[in-house]
Amino acid sequence: MRFTAVDLGASSGRVMTADITADKIELAEAHRFPNRPVRVAGTLHWDILSLYQGVLDGLRRAGPAESAGVDSWAVDYGLLDAAGRLIGNPVHYRDARTAGVAERIDPYEVTGLQFLPFTTVNQLLRERLDEAATLLMIPDLIGYWLTGRIAAERTNASTTGLYDVTRRDWAWELVDRLGLPRRILPPITDAESGPVREDVAAELGYSTVVTQVASHDTASAVVAVPATGPNFAYISCGTWSLVGVELPAPVLTEQSRLANFTNETGLDGTVRYLRNVMGLWILQECLRVWDHPDLEALLAEAEHARTDAVIDPDDPSFLPPGDMPARIDAYCSRTGQRPPEGRAQAVRCILQSLALAYKRAVDDAARLSGRPVEVVHVVGGGSRNALLCRLTAEATGLPVVAGPVEAAALGNALVQARARGLVGDLAEMRDLVRRSADVRTYEPRGREWPQ
């Protein structure tokens, strides 16, 4: 059976076809398109209509399939009026409107979320909601435009700061306390499906069904982690890095809150117990400032470059777009370190800093959850970065299994396949990924490491 996975990332979108049998998955790219934010009158927006057009173009190129599914990044949303019309382009989570948020307003014992200033709840408190009738997270918004169906998919709802991770419903008492209108939060659903609208079918040249998948891209990526047992950590590595373990229940202790760990919902009621790390965003911004040099050549130079400089990837100075090389130099100067000299050293500094941040997150996840970690799985685009994977193995002292690259699309397609009865539980899905995906293992060699 063929399925189509729409996977929207913070820097690009892709539409993939997945031919799935009982023995193998064959994934192919039908269309890839950029995701370029647009600043208008001082506010940074997602170009959501361009993204939607990219989705339509991709579905048209992919052709007919059993169904399609949509996943994307979390936190951001669109607001609809009573007639179902979008009220303005969604605002980007990197916009400065939440820059002054210093304290959490969602109680950790309810939402279980890591504190991030740009969480949905913090964004909503800076909105005028008088005309808003419905809030839809980004993949729910795309799904609404495709099918006309209004619903909140659970894994993405759990990232908003308005979801009760224990009751598995909207945290209505919190919604009321914050003065947010209940009407904007649609029913939370799992794995619903529905046909595309007639006008969409006419534009595509065929009709299909849209299946509700684990619509937070990290939730989909974790579905496709090729683990053989429960004692693994994962790093979903892209513009952001999500580092954690998979658990059967949330960890809502004070120690967990102080360590800034989040409890987000995964497939089948699992909990993605993780910490957000800034990820490859810092490198991506450096490449932009450097006018997009050849990355492979730069990584080859960084392989042999040496620098003791280490940054905290989660320092607030690295969150907004801007001159990252200058910010790295400034961070090193104010922390008494010698800044990297040249681009290769800067790349080395970024990657070893990420590897050390991954080590801290993996160690903390194991300590706070009581789940031992025997192997680290790196999935997503960052799994192609051999230097980062080697440095992560060195930092953690654990074997690192890199791949699959398109984990979110694979997880997306596997949930669709399960809805058609083709695969079963998570263990069966992961077994199928292991038999299909190209992965590489990096063993730690015990080299000296900057602390």
Image (cartoon, helix red, strand yellow):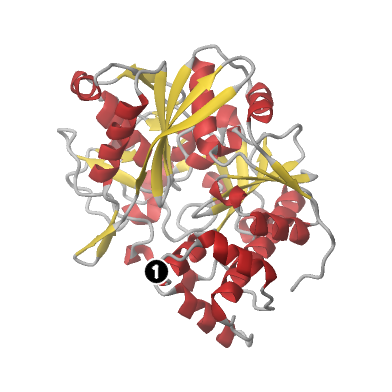
Closest to the observer, 325 or 121: 325
Which residue was labeled with disc 1?
291
Q: For the point 22% across and 24% down, which residue is it? A: 200
User: Where 332 falls versus 94 (above or below)?
Assistant: below
Q: Is residue 331 left or right of residue 402?
A: left
Q: Residue furthest left?
A: 83
Q: Helix, strand, or loop for circle 1?
A: loop
Is 115 rendered above or below residue 140?
below
Instruction: Please provide percent x and percent y for residue 337.
Output: 64, 85
Furthest residue in direction top, as rendered: 421
- In this view, the residue in front, 364 or 390, is 390
Q: Position of residue 301 (x, y in %)?
A: 62, 69
Who is closer to the viewer here, 384 or 51?
384
Q: 433 left or right of 17? A: right
Residue at 39 percent of width and 71 percent of height = 322
| Foreground residue among 59 and 61 | 61
Tell me where residue 232 appears, x and y as whole percent: 73, 41
Q: Residues within 10 Å of mark 1 (few under 14, many from 20)?
A: few
Figure label count: 1
Residue at image location 34% in from the left, 50% down from the top: 35
Identify which amino acid the numbered label 1 is placed on. Asp
